[in-house]
Image (spheres, rainbow, N blue to C red):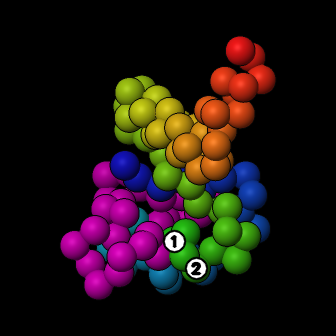
Amino acid sequence: MAYKITSQCISCNICLSACPVGAVKMIGDRPWIDPNLCTNCINTLYTVAQCKAGCPTCNGCVKQPTDYWEGWFATYNKLVANLTNKQDYWERWFNCYS
């Protein structure tokens, strides 16, 4: 799953030098991440994607799903994690609606 530069990018170009595999390219005056070269920094020295780690906006790069189901499950798992992180959520729900 490659990363994508978002509209929140401020064109600081830190990601150009941070990418260990050289997947970040300049198209005109905006950076672009080549999905064929992006490895999410797997099999490198780093454990997190360096374009995202070095981004001063923290949202200049986002993980882009490669197919529909991968994106669907990523969204689903994030929503389920939010529900299960709430203590006694289901118990409160049951007490409220029973």
Relative to the observer, which residue lies in front, 34 or 75?
75
Highlighted range, magenta: 24-50
Q: Which residue type carries mark 1?
A: Cys
Q: Main secondary structure of the magenta part?
A: loop
Residue at (73% x, 52% y) in the render: 7
Residue at (37% x, 49% y) in the render: 1
Position in image of residue 37 (x %, y %): 32, 59
Circles 1 and 2 in contact, beta carbons < 8 Å: yes
**Residue 51 has which mark?**
1
- Residue furthest top as drawn: 98
**Residue 54 has which mark?**
2
Residue at (47% x, 66% y) in the render: 24
Look at the picture and state if 91 lies above or below 94. Answer: below
Please indicate, yes or no, whether residue 78 appears anywhere in the rendered image: no
In the rendered view, does 69 fall on the left or right side of 17? left
Check if residue 81 falls in the magenta segment: no
Q: Which residue type carries mark 2?
A: Gly
Please indicate, yes or no, whether residue 2 appears anywhere in the rendered image: yes
Q: Secondary structure at mark 2?
A: loop
Q: Secondary structure at mark 1?
A: helix
Residue at (66% x, 62% y) in the render: 60
Look at the picture and state if 42 lies above or below 2. Answer: below
